[in-house]
Image (cartoon, rainbow, N blue to C red):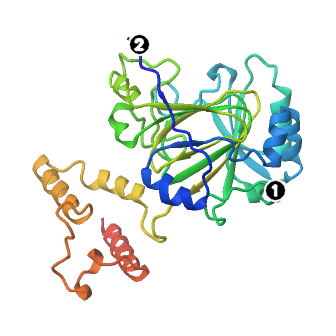
Amino acid sequence: MSLPEPTPIREVDGVDHARFDAEIRPARQPVILRGLGKDWPAVQAGRTSPEAAIAYLKRFSQPQPVLAVLGPPEIEGHFGYLPDLTGFNFQRGRTPLDPFLDRLLRDQDEARPFSMAVQSAKIPEILPGFVDENRIDLIDADVVPRIWIGNRIHVSTHYDLMENVGLVMTGRRRFTVFPPEQLANLYCGPFDPTPAGTPVSLVNLSCPDLERFPRFAEAMEHAQSALLEPGDAIYLPFHWWHAVDSLDAVNAFVNYWWNPAPAGLGGAYEALLFALMSLRGLPDDQRDVWRMIFDHYVFGANGDPAAHLPLAAKGPLGPITPAQVGRMKATLIEALSRK
């Protein structure tokens, strides 16, 4: 069975902070922002050569170790699970950044190098001064940028619990994205363990096993894709699934994660885990009732569930304030301590 090719991700030019907030984000669709970082000194170095890109990063590197992942040559860049899904085909560890960068350059011409990556490192901590020379103005300045550095890596289809803008510094990256509602067709792996905190798709995009994962054909009907060059950026809305292929022997990518939800709320992902523990094993008739209750109180299926109550009596159904959140957290902590 042949699968359809992904449609191109929409490209948008001339986006500033105001247009990003007023037009791009409300649409809740991924977009490509070609050349957003074309004037970055980091990108100009990255376009020159891998050696120039690494030399630029070394201007800012620090001696303290950074987190890195390493996989044997036989995984060919596909970081993921062992066949029994109880562990991973890579190892995590710490290394000073400069030797890691040197190894990337040294392995450029290797036919089957070790797969290696520094992932999601906070730039102000490991490359102080980098942000002063390389900025974007689409999002608030207090969002901390992170850097991803590695060789030819294939990151499984996954989602972020935040909004995301990412920009290629050097190398090329292919993004393949799916809307959140394709969850059932992407065949997620375990909740524990996970490669990076949340479940990832078990489908290998380069050779999908449709006998094992037949509904993935439906997911591909909704897939979008784009190839990013140095200086290009992508915006990924909350919870859009994305697989990332780093296509060159030396790659560096800068991303910005942020969450527009009010600060101080309990974690929604943790609420999901608690719901799996407390609701999934109930009898069917009880789960049906709880589904109705959640729709009514949490998702407002019938309008404001507290519209008939005076403000002082709304409690958890009223305005979300730090004081109210504190009271709810205290109630949950007390309840969990009794279980």
Q: Residue at x 18, y 57 (%)?
A: 290
Q: Amino acid at mark 1?
A: Glu
Q: Residue furthest top?
A: 1
Q: As drawn, is 200 to the left or to the right of 155?
A: left
Q: Pointer 1: residues within 10 angstroms few (<14), some, or many (20+)?
A: few
Is 155 or 287 nearer to us in this picture? Answer: 155
Q: As drawn, is 105 to the left or to the right of 173?
A: right
Is 315 or 196 nearer to us in this picture? Answer: 315
Q: Which quadrant is home to the N terminus? A: top left
Residue on which disc 1 sits: 133
Please state the horizontal and vertical placement of residue 121, each as a whole percent of the image.
69, 51
Determine which of the numbered discs, if any, sits on residue 203 in the image. Answer: none
Q: Residue at x 54, y 40 (%)?
A: 195
Residue on which disc 2 sits: 2
Is 229 or 276 nearer to us in this picture? Answer: 229
From this viewpoint, is residue 80 visible?
no
Q: Pointer 2: residues within 10 angstroms few (<14), some, or many (20+)?
A: few
Q: Which quadrant is home to the C terminus? A: bottom left
Q: Residue at x 71, y 33 (%)?
A: 116
Placement of 9 over or under 167, stated as above or below:
above
Q: Quadrant of residue 199?
A: top left
Element carrying mark 1: helix
Please state the horizontal and vertical placement of residue 113, each as a whole percent of the image.
75, 23
Element carrying mark 2: loop
Placement of 331 over or under 248, stated as above or below:
below
Q: Earlier in the sequence, mark 1 or mark 2?
A: 2
Distance of label 1 from label 2 (alpha carbons)? 46 Å
Q: Amino acid at mark 2?
A: Ser
Q: Residue at x 80, y 60 (%)?
A: 132
Q: As drawn, is 189 to the left or to the right of 153?
A: left
